[in-house]
Amino acid sequence: MRFSDYAHDWLYGENGYYAKTPPIGKRGDFYTSVSASPFFGGAIANHIVRQIAAGELDEDALICEFGAHGAELTADVAQFIHTIAPKLFASLRFAIVEPIAALRERQERYLQEGFGGAITLLVVPKIDDLSAKSSFVFANELFDSFAFDIIDRGKIAFVENGAIVWREEAGLEASFRGERFLGYESFAKRLRSRFERCEFMTFDYGTKEARGDFSARIYKDHQVFALFELPTLAPFFQNSDLTADVNFGALIEAFRGAGFETATLKNQNSALIEMGIAELLKLYEEKAGFEAYRREVGRVRTLLDPATLGERFKMLLVR
């Protein structure tokens, strides 16, 4: 089986890893910026409020997340908008695009328990179920979960009995070595087709250009396993997370090809600071007191520290 098909079955098959709705955080196989602090969503919310004030987004814009998992990030974004600009919270619409039925049920339940009838919410299986004149769409660690091919100088990876084998394939660049994600172009085109005006923000780990080497790896119980150091993939198949570094240069080209005209790429720490995370923390100190502020600063430091998530992760914004 071609590795990209194997990867899709691994993550999204009937018994795939994500279909089992695995926990994220200390109890899961890995943690994300969403796990680290709700102020990650707060910074996104602050950016949305600023964009509306600048006339870049409408007051009744659709705020939509892809790859929401348990919907914690959407909840954090909505809660901070409610705190910062309660009138906007009442006029904005919220949505999640989630192809996995079990996750859709979990997301709807979580948001209804948190907000009840106060939030205008749609949870849909595909982007074709949405349309809007003005939209802000966001994602966290979405593109690293797309299926990918593994290529090595004219050869492409297949999986046989849990082991990686290489086969020659015509048309491959003789010098390319690494992972090539599938579906970036189709994602960008479908996103552009559904919204008249769209701003899209995503956070993920990766590099601006192709690495020129392999980054594919497995996360299991907060341990990292390099794909090519394992004698067989079988014990990990559908029971662990499979990922690789995002090539942001290729992702930007996919969005530009779909008609997105501007693109900004920054390290996560620089982006969150510019989006006002420090100002939000100051407001939190005024309301919650110094001790609560001090505890939250420790969590936010994980988002900003170059040695953890601050520079390993990037923020891409396209319009």
Image (cartoon, rainbow, N blue to C red):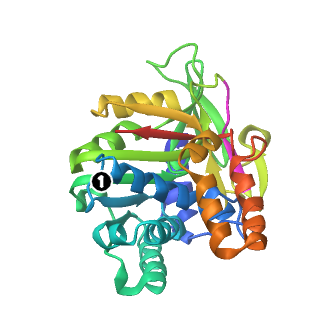
What is the crowding at mark 1: few (fewer than 14 residues within 10 Å), some, or many (at least 20)? Answer: many
Image point 43% across, 67% down: which residue?
100
What amino acid type is highlighted by mark number 1? Ser
Q: Who is closer to the viewer here, 266 or 2? A: 266
Taking the magenta stretch, the answer to whether it contains residue 259 is no
Residue receiving disc 1: 135
Most extreme residue toward the front is 286
Image point 58% across, 63% down: which residue?
17
Q: Position of residue 157 (x, y in %)?
A: 59, 34
Q: Position of residue 255 (x, y in %)?
A: 36, 34
Can you say whether 169 is above or below 302 in the image? Answer: above
Choose top left, top right, bottom left or bottom right for residue 294. Answer: bottom right
Q: Is residue 164 left or right of residue 301?
A: left
Q: Which portion, as a residue range, is magenta?
A: 213-219
- Tell how many labels: 1
Image point 60% across, 55% down: which residue?
279
Image point 24% across, 62% down: which residue?
129
